[in-house]
Amino acid sequence: MFNDPQLQARYDELQSAIRDLGSVVVAFSAGVDSTLLLKASRDALGAGNVVAVTGLSDTYPDEEMQEARELARELGVEHVMARTEELTDPRYAQNSHQRCFFCKHELYTRLNSVREERGFAVVIDGTNADDLGDHRPGLRAARNLGVRSPFEEIRMGKDEIRSISSELGLRTWDKPAFACLSSRFPYGTPITVEKLKQVAEAEKVLRDLGFRGFRVRHHDKIARIEVPPEDFARIADHHDEIVTGVKAAGYRFVTLDLKGYTSGSLNEDLPSRVRGVTANQS
C-alpha cells in the first residue's frame, strides 16, 4: 500500500493504538488530522465500531460542514451532526483568551453524550505531537472530559500525518489549516452569530476566487485580509471583486496586511505569560 515502509510502519502503529480502544467516537472536523484519524479508525476497528461526529455550529462555515458529510460518506463511516451551543455561554461569547476552553468543553460534552448513547468506549480527537508547544485551553477541556488523542500518544506530527494521508490517497492531505471563525476576532470583541456570518461571507469571496490558506480578520468596520505574500499579486488582480464582495458582507473598509498570513496573529497582543496557556489559533 505504501511506497515508504517507514510510513507504513507508522500507520500500522496508529491503527494498533486505535485498535486497543475497542470502539470510538471520532471528533471529525474534516481537516487533515481528523480525516486521517477517521480513516485509521475505520481500518483498525471496522465501520460498526466507529462513528464520526461533527459539531454543528455557527462558528464554522457551511462549506466545512458539507465537506465533513462528504468525507465521512467516502470513508464509509456513519456521520452524526451534533448541535453545539457555545455561543449561548457568555464566557465564550465575551471572547477572552480562554474562549477555546469553553468551546471544546461544549463540543466534547456533546460527543460524550453520543458515546454514551452508542455504548462506545471513548472519544478521540486529532491533536498531534506538534500541537503541544503551548498549553492549549481546548486541550485542557478535552483531557478533563476523558478524550484520547492517538496521534499525540504515538508522537506523530503534522508532516507525518500529511505524508501518510497522501500515501493513502486522502484528498485532505494538503488541505490548509482551518480554525473556527471566532479566531478572526481580537480578544475582547464580543462574538455574535451576525458577526460570524459576516466573516464567513467575506472569506467565501476569497475562497470562491481560489485562494487557500488565508484569513479575514474582523476589526469592526475593517476587514483585514491575510494571505501569503506570494498571493499579493493575485489579490491585486482580483481587487475589484474582493472589495465589492467583502463590502457586501458588511465591511466599510477592506485592507491587506502586508505582513502576510500569520497563524495566530491575534495572539500577538497577549502578554507572554498568557500566551503560554493559549491555544495556537490560526
Image (tube, rainbow, N blue to C red):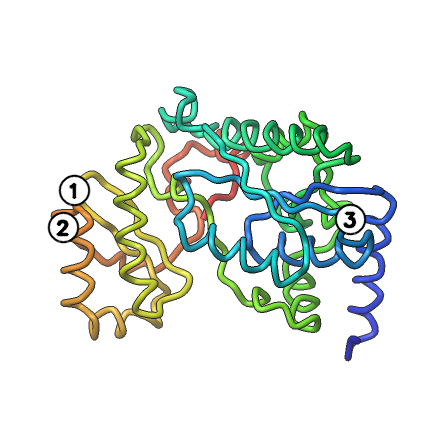
**Which percent across, then down, holds residue 144?**
67, 25
Amino acid beneath label 2: Phe
Question: Does residue 80 lie above or below 76 as drawn?
Answer: above
Q: Earlier in the sequence, mark 2 or mark 3?
A: 3
Residue wearing tag 3: 48
Q: CA distance from mark 2 to mark 1?
A: 6 Å
Q: Is residue 159 left or right of residue 54?
A: right
Residue wearing tag 2: 253
Q: CA distance from mark 1 to mark 3?
A: 49 Å
Asked which quadrant contains residue 116, the reply is top right
Q: Is residue 49 left or right of residue 196?
A: right
Q: Is residue 242 left or right of residue 112?
A: left
Q: Is residue 265 left or right of residue 254?
A: right
- Residue at x 73% of width, y 55% of height: 156
Residue wearing tag 1: 221
Amino acid beneath label 1: Lys
Neighbours of disc 3 within 10 Å: few (<14), some (14-19), many (20+) = few
Amino acid beneath label 3: Gly
- Residue at x 66% of width, y 33% of height: 114
